[in-house]
Image (cartoon, rainbow, N blue to C red):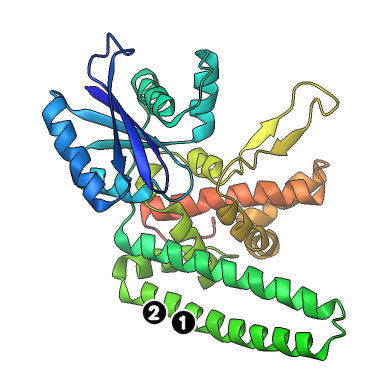
């Protein structure tokens, strides 16, 4: 096995190829354009240098990595998409002092060799489209709230007030159009439609939350355990064993913030309407957990139920 580290940005990506696992300091390096033509040139470069199967690793930063990751997966290469925080800590433990694109590519290749990270599975095209749609909807809704707050703050200028009202009317129409588009997109893809129905069988999760969860989770086969899904959403508990907060447990929050945010209100609803979540919430409150801590735990429980439903393809049923 040979190991390729990729440090990617908007315009280009640097690669470092470790050809001999026994000599990881000796690498072949190259820079390519972050474009379809650059992807093709990378494959040609690898074909002339790689004498064994190649394991590719890159960081999950921004959105620039995904097109290349999907391309390489479709070409049959093993691709791992790694939390950049893990690679940074590993680099610090190795005493890496410099930070350039070429150095980062070498560090990622060395990390891939040392840790052999789990292979990433590219989400289906319909899931990627859904993710882009729900993220755009979220941006529009945030923009609407911002303008509503400005209007509600007591604008004195009639011209500004009129402008804000026109912007809000446009945003309302665009949000409605996008919501219809998302519903139609799910309805046109049998896989998405089935998965959405499975999620909607869970008390507390409606159509909108189901769309966000499906878009943000991607391919469920990227997770082998419910705990991994909770960690991906930043819902894992973080125990503090020192300092003034010693003995306390807090939500980690190192994960997908959109997914975490989408589960907040459903968890509140589930704490009263979902028998499994309700019993869990009431027990935590009896044990002295504050309301917010209990809701956070319910969010984690809810995402674990989501994982179980999608993994098994079985609708949620209330235990007898």
Q: Secondary structure at mark 2?
A: helix
Q: Quadrant of the C terminus?
A: bottom right
Q: Which residue is mark 1?
A: 180
Q: Secondary structure at mark 1?
A: helix
* Neighbourhood count class around disc 2 (C-alpha, 10 Å): few under 14, some 14–19, many 20 upward: few
Q: Which residue is mark 2?
A: 184
- Tell which of 207 and 18 is nearer to you: 18
Q: Quadrant of the N terminus?
A: top left
Q: Quadrant of residue 190?
A: bottom left
Residue 222 spot, x, y in % from top left: 38, 43
| In the image, farthest residue toward the top | 22
Q: Answer whether labels 2 and 1 touch (C-beta < 8 Å).
A: yes
Residue at x 27%, y 14% (from the top left corner): 21
Residue at x 57%, y 67% (from the top left corner): 138
Residue 31 spot, x, y in % from top left: 30, 35
Which numbered disc covers residue 286? none
* Neighbourhood count class around disc 1 (C-alpha, 10 Å): few under 14, some 14–19, many 20 upward: few
Q: Is residue 111 visible?
A: yes
Does residue 58 appear to the left or right of 258 in the view shown? left
């Amino acid at each position: 096995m040979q190991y390729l580290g990729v440090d990617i940005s908007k315009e280009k990506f640097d690669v470092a190829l470790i050809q001999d696992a026994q000599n990881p300091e000796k690498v072949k390096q190259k820079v390519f354009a972050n474009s379809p033509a650059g992807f093709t040139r990378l494959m040609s470069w690898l074909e002339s240098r790689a004498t064994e199967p190649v394991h590719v690793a890159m960081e999950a930063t921004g959105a620039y990595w995904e097109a290349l990751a999907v391309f390489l997966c479709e070409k049959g290469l093993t691709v791992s998409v790694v939390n950049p925080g893990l690679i940074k800590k590993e680099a610090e433990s190795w005493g890496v002092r410099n930070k350039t694109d070429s150095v980062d590519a070498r560090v990622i290749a060395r990390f891939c060799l040392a840790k052999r990270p789990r292979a990433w599975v590219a989400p289906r095209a319909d899931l990627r489209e859904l993710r882009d749609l729900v993220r755009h909807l979220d941006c529009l809704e945030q923009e609407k709230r911002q303008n509503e707050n400005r209007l509600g703050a007591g604008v004195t200028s009639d011209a500004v007030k009129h402008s804000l009202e026109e912007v809000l009317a446009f945003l309302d129409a665009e949000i409605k159009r996008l919501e219809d588009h998302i519903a139609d997109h799910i309805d046109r893809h049998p896989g998405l439609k089935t998965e959405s129905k499975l999620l909607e069988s869970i008390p507390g999760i409606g159509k909108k939350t189901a769309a966000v969860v499906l878009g943000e989770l991607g391919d469920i086969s990227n997770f082998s355990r419910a705990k991994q899904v909770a960690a991906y959403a930043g819902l894992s508990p973080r125990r503090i064993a020192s300092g003034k907060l010693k003995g306390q447990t807090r939500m980690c929050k190192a994960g997908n913030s959109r997914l975490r945010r989408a589960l907040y209100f459903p968890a509140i609803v589930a704490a009263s309407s979902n028998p499994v979540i309700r019993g869990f919430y009431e027990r935590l409150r009896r044990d002295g957990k504050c309301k917010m801590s209990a809701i956070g735990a319910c969010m984690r429980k809810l995402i674990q139920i989501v994982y179980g439903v999608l993994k098994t393809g079985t609708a949620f049923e209330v235990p007898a």
